[in-house]
Amino acid sequence: MRWLLVAIVVAATTCGDLLQAWEMKRQGAAGRFRPTWPLGAAVVCMAVSFFSFLKLLEIEDLSFAVPATAASLVLETILARALLRERVEGRRWAGALLVACGVILLGQT
């Protein structure tokens, strides 16, 4: 159950962040902001992430939940490069790799 909740938190956070970034890039300047379905979907994704994280905290310690859900950073880095065509520098790739290693170590305990 705990890894299912981790997967939901990671997927929902990643989806919410990507939708928000994509829509903000599409809309451009802040002066022309208007609510759209991608922003609404991003809010829903972040709400799912939040409530799933709360449920995870009911069954696991904070010392497990926070590092495990940090896997969203790895997924976001990969998808930002692949889908949003963002330039990702070496330091961010190195950080994502370290986080991935930490999550793998956490999974073995």
Image: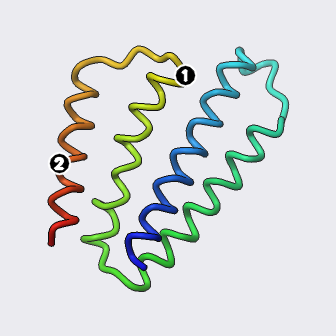
- Kind of residue at disc 1: Leu
Q: Quadrant of residue 91?
A: top left
Picture residue at 45% right of the left edge, 61% below the top: 7
Where the C terminus falls, by quadrant?
bottom left
Image spot of residue 3 (x, y percent): 38, 70
For this orientation, the residue located farthest to the bottom is 59
The image shows residue 68, relative to residue 79, as above or below, that is below
Q: Which disc number belongs to residue 84?
A: 1
Q: Quadrant of residue 56?
A: bottom left
Secondary structure at numbered mark 2 = helix
Where the N terminus falls, by quadrant?
bottom left
N-terminal-most mark, 2 or 1: 1
Q: Which disc number belongs to residue 15?
A: none
The image shows residue 20, relative to residue 59, as above or below, that is above
User: Image check: 24 left or right of 101?
Assistant: right
Residue that label 2 marks: 101
Q: Residues within 10 Å of mark 2 (few under 14, many from 20)?
A: few
Picture residue at 28% right of the left edge, 27% below the top: 92
Image spot of residue 19 (x, y percent): 64, 36
Counting every numbered tag in the picture gives 2
Secondary structure at numbered mark 1 = loop
Q: Residues within 10 Å of mark 1 (few under 14, many from 20)?
A: some
- Kind of residue at disc 2: Cys
Measured in 3D between alpha carbons, the distance from the residue under mark 2 to the one under mark 1, in whole angstroms, is: 25 Å
Picture residue at 84% right of the left edge, 30% below the top: 34
User: Image check: 35 left or right of 78?
Assistant: right
Q: Nearer the viewer, residue 74 or 62?
A: 74
Image spot of residue 46 (x, y percent): 61, 54
Image spot of residue 108 (x, y percent): 16, 67
